Amino acid sequence: MITVSIVTFHTPTKLITQTITSILKNSIDKLFIVDNSSNDSLRIIEKASEKIRYIHSKNLGYGGGHNIAIRESIMMNAKYHVVINPDIYFDDDVITVLSKYMDQNSDCGLVMPKVLYPNGELQYLCKLLPTPLDLFGRRFLPFKNFIKERNRKYELHFTNYDTIMEVPYLSGCFMFFRNSILKKVGLFDEQYFMYAEDLDICRRINKVAQTIYYPLVFVHHEYEKGSYKDNKLLKYHVISVIKYFSKWGWFFDKERHAVNKRILKELGYKNK
């Protein structure tokens, strides 16, 4: 059984309808739409398919919203649960292909497909475990050339994103989970209202299973860096990053160093 969840907050109907249409073209058993909006105007979408369950919730944040659906998924004894942003759309075999990969690779706890902008340009969403410099430097430091070169390593540009590979930090825009692994490591940490919840759960999963990038199928993502345009979102971003490093370690994180070193070696990275 495969379940899917979308968390929405005043998302334009046209945008989320595109996402729902993509999901329902795939072989899934239940689609949870968790609406954190102040009203339930999207409830009408539930009529589009008996597979849709609409849940109007108080705003628990991104991870908290998805946790509502994941708990339902686990209670249904679903094998897999897919977390998808409301600005994602894709062809009608993506979920099927990813489920087959998971069936054939029992050591994989999480998989993410290739992610493209609507114009077909690649989004660099495969990352190492970040240092404070990786997350704060790219936004606040003036050394643009230095940060650009550092990002090429941090975002694994050297791999060309064309082979299946283990990646310690995958984007939360499309996360295909094995529920048995989530039962081991826990769900999204709800101390992160927005941002860093994907990083945190990837790190926990990667301790007990593989977190895999699978580029043989792709999705389109109408991605906007909200925190670059909205001071309120920037505040959420900074708070979540501080919480992440306070939980896992700031500058002296031996586990981060060991994981990144292993991944870079496996991927054949060579310093210039």
Image: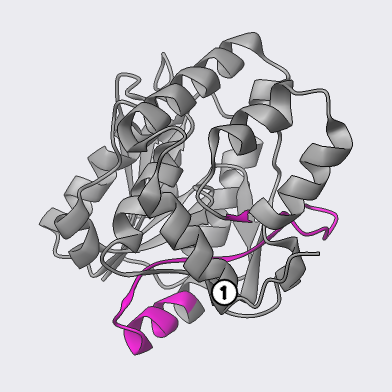
Q: Does the magenta run of residues contain 106?
A: yes
Q: Which residue is mark 1?
A: 265
Question: How many numbered callouts?
Answer: 1
Q: Nearer the viewer, residue 88 or 270?
A: 270
Rendered view: 134 above or below 202? above
Say whether residue 176 is visible.
yes
Dot 1 falls on a residue whose secondary structure is helix
Between 4 and 253, the residue placed more toward the observer is 253
Residue in view at x 68 percent, y 61 percent: 156
Image quadrant where residue 57 sits:
top left
Residue 225 placement, left or right of 16: right
Q: Is residue 18 left or right of residue 57?
A: right
At 71% from the left edge and 44% from the top edge, which residue is drawn?
222
Above or below, 195 against 129 in this view is above
Q: Badge 1: few (under 14), some or many (20 or more) residues near its Cα, within 10 Å? A: few
Q: How is the image coloured?
A: one colour
Query: Percent position (x, y) of residue 249?
Result: 37, 35
The amino acid beneath tag 1 is Lys
- Residue 87 percent across, percent down from the top left: 62, 43
Magenta span covers which residues? 98-127
At x 43%, y 51%, the residue is 256
Residue 238 drawn at (x, y percent): 53, 20
Q: Is residue 185 left or right of residue 64?
A: left
Camera sees residue 41: no
Answer above or below: position of 87 versus 236. Answer: below
Furthest toward the bottom, the residue is 104
Q: Quadrant of the N terminus?
A: bottom left
Quadrant containing the C terminus is: bottom right
